[in-house]
């Protein structure tokens, strides 16, 4: 098949994916701004936000991963013009996401004492505790927001979650500035101020997205008159069967990056702060791949609803190609600027912490070389995972992600990440190994399934 058969899909892929990317970049940009603002307070504060957020990332991965079950069901119902099925999928998804949000808040809240058992720097743990209390509460509105977002994505209305996220981010940045540093008569709360900003912005995002969807003809009937407690066991079971493996897939990946935060904490506060910088920069480029992954889930879900399997495969490959081209560009960017990018995060005019800041930048610049290399495998694995979710194939990919990250990636990170081996760089070599294994195995799975669907349909 000629390359044009794939590139002609780029414009529509971009139209679907760009709002998702911008919305997700918005989430990561908040973390970027938090890190820069908190970084002005010192490396211990930056490491504390990193440690607190490591617990949040694990919980968020479960909530966000579960909510992705809503999108392919809505996309399939939308193509088949089955409103009743679509409304049922959304209502039950919203109900389950609300329960999961509350459970995740409780999980993070009661898991806090684990920080003392993890041999993390004591100064960092004591700063992280009050920050985590408030940020944990924000999990509830975050997972509810995700239910609305995944519903909007399933109807190909990807712009509206983006608007809500971007406006929420503006509120977060303003509140951070006022409450971290105590500006314009506000109390100076340090990193706890960042937590208040996050909580307020997430509550606003839920309300704003509901308000936007209520105002649109295509989505109004779905998001109004929801009889939330009139439930259907079969739909709950279907969502759990799709959502639980999707949650575990995201959990296995996020958990290995979280393990990298904890392993770097064993090396000291500076390696931990450097890890946070490299992770934050990689997260921003990863959101582009995540946007394309959501587009893959929507478009594959649509084609599955039409039973157009040959088209499904061609469209999926156009997304894989597009994601790889972006990943190569980011890899070059990270490699060329690996010495300059970490300097954005620290204050070189701070004479008291100058030696610490220099060490953080030196470590982070090495980690960005590893991050440059794994851009490609990270993009491919998340794109193929999105396409597999669109096919509603979630169980085998869950096993693949577990093997890749925890039987291959983590042991390498743990062994090479010791102080007498390669330290922080060794931890990231393990991440690279896990992501590359996942990319290869998931691609083999997608290739096998789509070929089988085409053969069985002919």
Image (cartoon, rainbow, N blue to C red):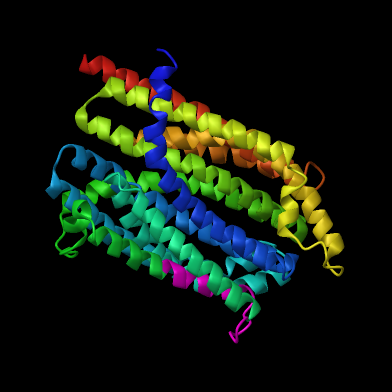
Q: Residue at x 82, y 68 (%)?
A: 350
Q: Position of residue 306 (x, y in %)?
A: 20, 29
Q: Residue at x 27, y 14 (%)?
A: 455
Q: 56 left or right of 177? A: left
Q: Quadrant of residue 11?
A: top left
Q: 308 left or right of 208? A: left
Q: Quadrant of residue 188?
A: bottom right
Which quadrant holds the N terminus? Answer: top left
Q: Residue at x 60, y 31 (%)?
A: 328
Which quadrant holds the C terminus? Answer: top left
218 inside magenta stretch: no
Main SS of residues in magenta? helix
Q: Residue at x 60, y 73 (%)?
A: 177
- Front-most of residues 166 and 68: 166
Q: Which residues are magenta?
A: 183-202
Q: Position of residue 436 (x, y in %)?
A: 57, 31
Q: Position of residue 337 (x, y in %)?
A: 73, 42
Residue 21, visible in the rendered structure: yes
- Front-most of residues 65 and 77: 77
Residue 398, visible in the rendered structure: no
The tally of labels here is 0
- Front-most of residues 96 and 410: 96
């Amino acid at each position: 098949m000629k390359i044009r058969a794939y590139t002609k899909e780029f414009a529509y892929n971009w139209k679907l994916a760009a709002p998702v990317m911008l919305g997700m970049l918005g989430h990561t940009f908040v973390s970027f701004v938090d890190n820069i603002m908190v970084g002005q307070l010192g490396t211990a504060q930056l490491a504390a936000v990193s440690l607190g957020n490591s617990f949040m990332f694990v919980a968020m991965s479960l909530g966000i991963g579960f909510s992705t079950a809503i999108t392919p069901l809505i996309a399939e119902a939308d193509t088949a013009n089955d409103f009743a099925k679509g409304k049922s999928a959304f209502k039950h998804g919203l109900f389950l996401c609300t329960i999961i949000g509350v459970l995740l808040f409780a999980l993070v809240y009661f898991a806090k004492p684990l920080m003392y058992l993890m041999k993390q720097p004591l100064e960092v743990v004591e700063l992280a505790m009050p920050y985590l209390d408030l940020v944990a509460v924000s999990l509830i509105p975050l997972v509810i927001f995700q239910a609305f977002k995944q519903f909007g994505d399933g109807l190909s209305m990807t712009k509206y979650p983006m608007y809500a996220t971007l406006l929420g981010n503006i509120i977060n940045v303003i509140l951070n500035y006022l409450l971290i540093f105590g500006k314009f008569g506000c109390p100076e709360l340090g990193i706890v101020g960042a937590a208040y900003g996050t909580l307020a912005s997430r509550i606003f995002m839920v309300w704003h997205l509901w308000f936007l969807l209520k105002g649109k003809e295509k989505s109004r009937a779905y998001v109004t008159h929801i009889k939330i407690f009139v439930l259907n066991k079969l739909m709950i079971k279907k969502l759990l069967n799709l959502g639980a493996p999707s949650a575990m897939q995201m959990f296995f990946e996020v958990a290995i990056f979280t393990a990298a935060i904890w392993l770097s904490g064993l090396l000291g506060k500076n390696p931990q702060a450097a890890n946070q910088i490299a992770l934050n920069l990689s997260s921003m480029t990863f959101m582009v791949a995540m946007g394309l992954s959501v587009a893959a889930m929507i478009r594959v879900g649509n084609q599955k609803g039409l039973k157009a399997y040959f088209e499904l495969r061609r469209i999926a490959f156009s997304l894989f190609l597009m994601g790889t081209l972006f990943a190569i560009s980011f890899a070059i960017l990270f490699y060329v600027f690996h010495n300059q990018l970490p300097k954005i995060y620290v204050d070189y005019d701070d004479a008291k912490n100058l030696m610490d800041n220099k060490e953080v930048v030196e470590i982070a610049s090495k980690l960005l070389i590893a991050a440059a290399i794994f851009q490609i495998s990270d993009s491919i694995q998340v794109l193929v995972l999105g396409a597999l979710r669109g096919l509603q194939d979630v169980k085998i990919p869950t096993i693949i992600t577990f093997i890749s990250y925890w039987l291959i990636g983590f042991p390498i990170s743990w062994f090479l990440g010791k102080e007498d081996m390669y330290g922080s760089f060794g931890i990231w070599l393990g991440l690279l190994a896990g992501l590359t294994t996942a990319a290869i195995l998931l691609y083999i799975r997608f290739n096998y399934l789509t070929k089988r669907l085409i053969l069985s349909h002919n």
